[in-house]
Image (cartoon, coloured by chain):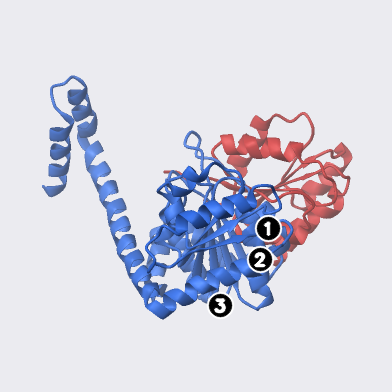
Chain colours: A red, B blue
Amino acid sequence: MERPIRVLVAKPGLDGHDRGAKVIARALRDAGMEVIYTGLRQTPEQIVEAAIQEDVDVVAMSILSGAHNTLFPKVVNLLRERGVTDRLIVGGGVIPEDDIPFLIQTGVEAIFTPGTSTKDVVEFIKTHVKRQ
Amino acid sequence: MNIEDRLLAGDKIACARLISMLENNDKEAEEILKKLYHKTGKAYIIGVTGSPGAGKSTLTDKMAKKLREAGKKIGILAIDPTSPFTGGAILGDRIRMTDLSLDEGVFIRSMGTRGNLGGLSKATSSAIKVLDIFGCDYIFVETVGVGQSEIDIVKMADTVLMVLVPNMGDDIQAIKAGTMEIADVFAINKSDLDGADKTKLEIEMNLDLNDSKAFRPKVIKVSAIKNKDIDTLLEAIFEHRDYQMRTGNFDIRRINNARQEILDLAKEDLINLIMKKAVENDFLNTIVNEVYKRKLDPYSAKEELLNLLLN
């Protein structure tokens, strides 16, 4: 049997809205993935530690607070510092178009904004996951 | 450094990786466990079971925190159900343990059941070994939310903690067979709710009917969310551990568990072997069809299938 893709769904920072993260978690579950949800208000350090202990293939983060330019790159960098470079990192939430090129450049491989179909997210993860 | 040396050096990335490999039936990982098996057996394994929403994760979080104060290294394996339809899972036990997430001395791993019944995943016993080699003093194994008959945890745990909540049914529920029989310690969680005393009394009365020479499980009222009476609960767990050490029951239990594990592993390989043989030349479909058409009975079909293995 094919192994399931493991995904950490995380909410970095201080906003308290996780409807979207839960919808994504559910969609990934229905696509046959193992989804680890860590709950609200996580620091980048907590997200990185969970990603390592859970040995996930994908870190999917959602932010609605506007702190994405700070928190997303922080997670990418902390993972790099630990020598972890074989994971797919994606982000979502209310993120202005203008910020997306910067985030992609720092190592977040896709940004999903409101209106994205969950099918597209599933498809992106399946085709971009880095580990066998 | 290879994954084996990194695990021994306390590398969390290697520990996590090895558990994944075991979950994915990686033969290399099994070879590593063969080599390192002699290093296992040091950790004390506490099974935490109970119905969905009883507070197993929150209670585990609080117990782990107390043991951390005493400087112990903790491993936590939290099992949640895998969908039988899609193979996907939501593993959400970690949400209750966020305070532990940055603690250097704690390793938490969520696992999906991946088709296994009985409350645990197939790789759980292997993952316990990895955490044991990793150097954990205590390993908590949190089962899926159980009903009345998922008792696999008893095959792996040194002490089984059953987490109950008030008002889950009448006193008949307390005398039913199954999960209620495997507990070494009972926790009545959410003890601030009405009915906690009544539930405790019902469990106690049921326990009074046990063989008087057997170990008498303690029933402890706790509130995980209020962090209340966690010390008392841990004391009850240690009391059970000490009783087992004193009486030799600890060794008896571990011998039984070893026997069970060998047989379970053999059973699994045997089933895989049968399945492999069965699908060769479409044999399985052929006999299934014959049974369906009443040309062959299922008992003779089984014998034909097993004969394949012997030839």
Q: What amino acid is labelled 3 in the image?
A: Ala
- Using the rendered view, name the quadrant where residue B232 is placed: bottom right
> Looking at the image, is B2 positioned above or below residue B23?
below
**SS of the residue under disc 2:** helix
Residue located beneath label 1 in the image: B224
For marks 3 and 1, give the CA distance.
Answer: 34 Å
* Residue B31 visible here: yes
Determine the residue located farthest toward the top in the rendered image: B293
Q: Which residue is at 28% across, 56% downward?
A: B266
Name the residue that disc number 3 marks: B9
Q: Where is residue B130 in the image (x, y as percent from the top left)?
A: 48, 67
- Mark 3 or mark 1, which has the lower sequence index? 3
Of the residues shown, which amino acid type is indicated by label 1?
Ala
Mark 2, residue position? B230
Q: What percent of the width, then of the height, locates residue B215?
A: 43, 68
State yes or no: discs 2 and 1 in contact (Cβ < 8 Å): yes
| Distance between the alpha carbons at the discs numbered 2 and 1 | 7 Å
Viewer-closest of A49 and B145: B145
The reply to whether dot 3 and dot 1 touch (C-beta < 8 Å) is no
In front of the other: label 3 or label 2?
2
| SS for dot 3 | loop
Chain assignment, label 3: B
Query: Quick check: do tags 3 and 2 share a chain?
Result: yes
Say whether disc 3 or disc 2 marks the residue closer to the N-terminus: 3
Q: Position of residue B17 (x, y in %)?
A: 53, 61
Hey, what amino acid is under mark 2? Ile
